[in-house]
Image (spheres, helix red, strand yellow):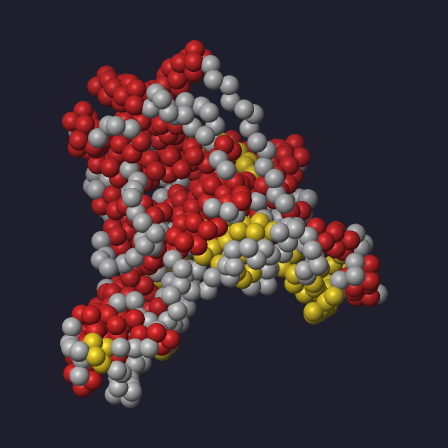
């Protein structure tokens, strides 16, 4: 099982704490960039004094004074994001309304409307009951709603999340997993979309550290061991490039930096390779000081110097200078072959581009002139505002739709008139139609891509030219939701379907009323509710809609018994009442240890093992309560875990295994290596004979001297599986063995 290093116990020393608070405050003042006026200093000082007084009795889970947190959040805003005195003031006060006696009106009175609005946006929603989709989703939606007023709320929230992740050691394990999952699911993608690369990378690394500590520490250790070798390599590699730059009179900086641990791990998973097989664990960055009007030309000049000395890979050139990413990112990327036969990624950018790449949104607006045309980043923020203002969407649906476009790669496509549009990777012709205009999307019946007729579900590629074909008779259909990837298209389709549903519900309502009259029952709310419960629909509108669709045929319905105008259905005809979520949670959390014990029949609570991650005894797991299917048990590393913990933490229960017994679990193993005589016999012998494991299935495939194999076998627990995998790794011809989820 994964383990985390615990921080040493905190020792309270009031005098040292006072000195530390003052030191941190002085560091905060030094970090505020730009022209800090005496008025700004007075405002920050006032906010600091109020925050110190308000939080004086509070401490963090680590034992430290709580005031450390708002001071550090404010410092991150200033030093790592580049925000000014107003944001620093709001950051110092961001928890006062939520956690102390200070009111929003008092904040407004002391610091003005702007600071009050920002603090309000950062104040969590409280008092929501189990009936809500997700309190996390509601709070995230509330934060995003402030985008229409002030984008600084988002930036301060990211700073708040970053400091919480940096100090997560003091939290209980289940809280660590929940917060890390939220971070991976929402906050890291949001930081990425806003161009905050450093914050995005650190959030991902910290989330991995707490979700899968063994993986994190293994990669971190390997990176540290190879640090000296990387430095020597970078020094030798850059010598000829430096000579060319010096000869041409460039002022520049060259640095090599390793990729984030999370991105390396993702690459290992995506490409199914070991750490040693990941060739681009670091990148070399060339930053030039040049005039704005010469940036593009000078970056391409530097590219020519690099490719004069090293052979580039033709399919690895990325020009984000001519066409910046939606988050404002500009850079020229190429991958070249070093003399030692190693591929090396080289990034070329100006000083301005580098600051925007590192600090994102704040830097973008600092460089933006008043008369500059609307950028792709401004378009993104407008899109977000449009999505936010949409009525009738549940918090969870909203968050899921919003996330669709946060972390996706982009393609560039063109209208028939030659106008360029940015869309997420895997976007379809239907996405393109809705991106043009919602009405074009609704009436879309087909498209021409590069002058060839294609269906609505056709996936677009960079460089495609698209013409949309429409018809006034066309109406959106439910299957369209499976054909789009953009949040805008999904929202507009759902909106159209809701309108259609409301229209059909009017027809269905009249049919229900007629049926009630035919049966001799009163046409009132009570009878309609009885009918709704009988058919198991959530709302009256759902009942009417299903009747109009023909799902429930009231004409064919056997006349139900009616007494005094009231419908009487037999009790057994109604759906069996299930225990409420609160009851199930109370039972589990009230038990010894507050956890569901898997394999223990004490609670008589139905649970199922996830078919995707296939948990086995000894795995670190959690339970997720589903509305109608009992509790599903997932591994912490399950692909679904991040989303479940992010949006449904109120449905999460701790789970543990009863202990080792005779129960067997089906687990999958994938392996790869050099094809050698007798390798199949050796592998099957280890599995079936030496480890006494029953196999459900086994398959081998050999191609050009390399074999890949998969086996589904029954093991007792995680230790049994690890032992089997370790034995397979010792075979000379096998170079990769990993657990296979499904």
Work out which residue is located at the far right of the displayed protein and give it.
677
Screen quadrant of the N terminus: top right
Q: Measuring from the top left, give residue 380's x and y in whole percent.
A: 30, 50
Number of numbered callouts drawn: 0
Can residue 552 be seen from the camera position used here?
Answer: yes
For the point 24% across and 70% down, the residue is: 529
Image side of residue 121 versus residue 330, left or right? left
Foreground residue, 571 or 54?
A: 571
Quarter of the image where one finds residue 454: bottom left
Foreground residue, 549 or 119?
A: 549
Image side of residue 473 versus residue 196, left or right? left
Screen quadrant of the C terminus: bottom right
Image side of residue 506 versus residue 368, left or right? left
Look at the picture and state if 362 lies above or below 41.
below
For the point 82% across and 59% down, the residue is: 690
Q: Measuring from the top left, give residue 576's x and y in whole percent.
A: 39, 69
For the point 54% across and 36% down, the residue is: 257
For the point 28% across and 45% down, the residue is: 142
Q: Measuring from the top left, give residue 717's x and y in whole percent.
A: 68, 54
């Amino acid at each position: 099982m994964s383990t985390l290093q615990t921080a040493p116990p905190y020792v309270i020393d009031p005098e040292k704490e006072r000195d530390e608070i003052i030191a941190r405050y002085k560091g905060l003042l030094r970090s505020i960039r730009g022209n800090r006026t005496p008025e700004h200093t007075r405002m920050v000082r006032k906010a600091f004094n109020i925050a110190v007084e308000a939080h004086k009795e509070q401490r963090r889970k680590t034992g430290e004074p709580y005031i450390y947190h708002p001071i550090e959040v404010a410092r991150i805003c200033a030093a790592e994001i580049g925000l000014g005195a107003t944001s620093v003031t709001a950051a110092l006060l961001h928890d006062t309304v939520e956690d102390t006696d200070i009111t929003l009106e008092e904040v407004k009175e002391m610091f003005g409307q702007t600071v009050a609005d920002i603090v309000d946006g950062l104040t969590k929603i409280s008092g929501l009951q189990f009936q809500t989709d997700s309190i996390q989703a509601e709070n995230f939606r509330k934060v995003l709603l402030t985008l229409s007023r002030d984008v600084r709320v988002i930036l301060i929230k990211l700073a708040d999340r970053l400091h919480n992740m940096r100090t997560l050691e003091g939290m209980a394990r289940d809280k660590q997993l929940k917060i890390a999952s939220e971070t991976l699911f929402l906050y890291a993608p949001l930081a990425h979309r806003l161009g905050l690369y450093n914050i995005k990378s650190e959030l991902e690394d910290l989330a991995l550290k707490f979700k899968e500590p063994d993986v994190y520490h293994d990669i971190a250790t390997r990176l540290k061991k190879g640090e000296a070798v990387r430095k020597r390599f970078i020094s030798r590699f850059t010598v000829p490039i430096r000579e060319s730059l010096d000869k041409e009179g460039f002022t520049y900086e060259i640095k090599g930096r390793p990729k984030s641990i999370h991105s390396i791990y993702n690459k290992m998973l995506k490409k199914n390779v070991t750490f040693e097989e990941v060739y681009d664990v670091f990148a070399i960055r060339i930053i030039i000081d040049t005039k704005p009007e010469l940036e593009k030309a000078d970056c391409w000049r530097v590219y020519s110097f690099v490719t004069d000395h090293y052979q580039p890979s033709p399919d690895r050139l990325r020009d984000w200078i001519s066409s910046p990413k939606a988050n404002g990112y500009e850079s020229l990327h190429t991958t070249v072959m070093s003399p030692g036969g190693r591929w090396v990624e080289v990034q070329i950018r100006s000083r301005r581009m580098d600051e925007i790449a590192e600090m994102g949104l704040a830097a973008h607006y600092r460089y933006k002139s008043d008369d500059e045309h609307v950028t792709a980043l401004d378009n993104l923020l407008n899109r977000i505002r449009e999505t936010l203002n949409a009525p009738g969407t549940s918090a969870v649906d909203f968050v899921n739709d919003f996330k669709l476009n946060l972390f996706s790669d982009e393609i560039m496509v063109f209208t028939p008139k030659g106008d360029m549009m940015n869309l997420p990777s895997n976007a379809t012709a239907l996405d393109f139609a809705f991106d043009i205009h919602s009405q074009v999307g609704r009436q879309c019946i087909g498209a021409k891509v590069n002058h060839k007729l294609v269906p609505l579900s056709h996936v677009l590629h960079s460089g495609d030219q698209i013409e949309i074909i429409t018809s006034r008779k066309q109406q959106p259909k439910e299957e369209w939701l499976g054909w789009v990837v953009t949040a805008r298209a999904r929202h507009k389709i759902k909106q159209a379907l809701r309108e259609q549903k409301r229209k059909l519900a009017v027809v269905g309502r009249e049919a229900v009323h007629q049926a009630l009259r035919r049966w001799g029952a009163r046409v009132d709310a009570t009878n309609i509710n009885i009918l709704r419960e009988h058919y198991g629909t959530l709302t009256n509108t759902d009942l009417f809609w299903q009747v109009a669709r023909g799902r429930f045929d009231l004409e064919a319905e056997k006349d139900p018994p009616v007494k005094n105008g009231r419908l009487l259905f037999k009790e057994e005809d109604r759906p069996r009442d299930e225990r409420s979520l609160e009851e199930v949670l109370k039972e589990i959390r009230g038990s010894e240890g507050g956890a569901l014990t898997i394999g223990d029949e004490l609670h008589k609570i139905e649970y199922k093992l996830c078919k995707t991650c296939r948990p086995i005894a000894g795995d670190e797991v959690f339970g997720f309560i589903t509305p109608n299917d009992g509790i599903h048990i997932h591994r912490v590393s399950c692909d679904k875990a991040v989303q479940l913990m992010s949006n449904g933490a109120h449905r999460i229960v701790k789970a543990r295994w009863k202990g080792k017994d005779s129960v067997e679990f089906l687990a999958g193993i994938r392996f790869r290596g050099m094809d050698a005589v007798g390798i199949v016999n050796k592998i099957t012998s280890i599995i079936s004979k030496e480890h006494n494991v029953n196999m459900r299935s086994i398959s081998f495939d050999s191609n050009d001297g390399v074999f890949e194999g998969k086996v589904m076998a029954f093991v007792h627990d995680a230790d049994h599986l690890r032992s089997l995998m370790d034995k397979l790794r010792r075979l000379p011809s096998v170079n990769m063995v990993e657990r296979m989820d499904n």
